[in-house]
Image (cartoon, helix red, strand yellow):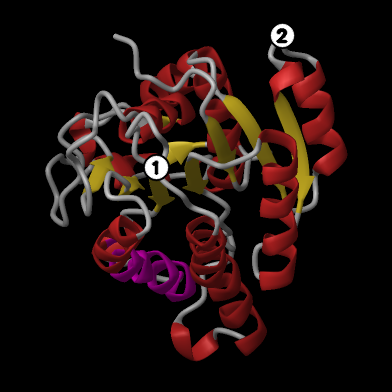
Amino acid sequence: MDLLLTDKTVLITGASGGIGRAMARVFAAEGANLVLHAGRNLDWLKQFIEHHEWRDRAIAVQADVADPAAVEAMFAAAVARFGRVDVCIANAGKWPPEDLALHELPEARLRNTLDINLFGSIWTARCFMKRLTPRPDQHGASLVFIGSTAGRFGERGHVDYSVGKAGLYGLVRTLKNEITRLDPFARVNMIEPGWTVTEMAREALEKPGVVERVVSTMAVRQLGRATDIARVAAFLASPAAARHISGEVLTVAGGMEGRLLWKDAEIDAAAIRRRAKDQA
């Protein structure tokens, strides 16, 4: 199926991370132009682009997504290179690995996590919408937020991350009604990944008992892959496949529920880790 993404310009924040890189590859395969954002790893991201045949239709940009002026400059660079941005994926995020209850949480960590996960998404969406104009072919723009099941079920020891991701619900439900004033065919949606094997999560997943605990609430006993999220992003961005989908949250977490579905004896953690590694 033609997703009608050829020659569309796609801006992806957090593109140097596992999910961001997977999205870059998936959108490039669909023929899109790419604006790939890095927070700190700009040189690495430039090298990543240079190793692919789509290097001539991609640029790397650096910005602190918590800084509105830096995000403005990032979008200005995107428009200067490609003329417009048709798809925006607000993917940049931070998950502090140390488990800390709210009463133990330093103010600096709380503010920093919210600045990146929530306010970074707000500034990204605002800059995208400020420059949005309808396309003559009526292929509506698409704004996709990357949330987390932590925003739905909560996550003990990570209230900063959970609250930041939960706040994206308000963005999706509000901006779907605002964006159509700028482009009548534009859409806003969110992907809600569960535990996905990336550099950010790998250390936590290697701890004894974590995989067993994670998959015990999932109908499909396997960890997510970055490509699983990337393909859903391409679907939601597509003016062909998802032209009438807006204001929705699509959970990609193996049927996760907020209750126990499997006993420890029914879970082979070693096999789950091995499949995730083989399929990454």
Percent of width and height locating residue 232: 34, 31
Q: Quadrant of residue 259?
A: bottom left
The answer to whether residue 155 is left or right of residue 259 is: right
Q: Residue at x 53, y 40 (%)?
A: 206
* Residue on which the image places disc 1: 141
Q: Can you name the residue that lies furthest to the right here?
A: 43
Instruction: Characterize the magenta stretch by its predominant secondary structure.
Output: helix
What type is the residue that disc 1 sits on? Answer: Ala
Q: Residues in magenta?
A: 158-172
What mark, if any, has residue 53 been given in the picture? 2
Q: Residue at x 34, y 39 (%)?
A: 140
Q: Quadrant of the N terminus?
A: top left
> Label 1 neighbourhood size at 10 Å, few (<14), some (14-19), many (20+)?
many
Q: Residue at x 41, y 52 (%)?
A: 145
SS at mark 1 in the image? loop
Percent of width and height locating residue 100: 51, 76
Q: Residue at x 42, y 50 (%)?
A: 146
Disc 1 vs disc 2: which is toward the camera? 1
Determine whether 258 is above or below 143 in the image. below
Determine whether 197 is above or below 7 in the image. below
Is residue 67 visible in the rendered image? The answer is no
SS at mark 2 in the image? loop
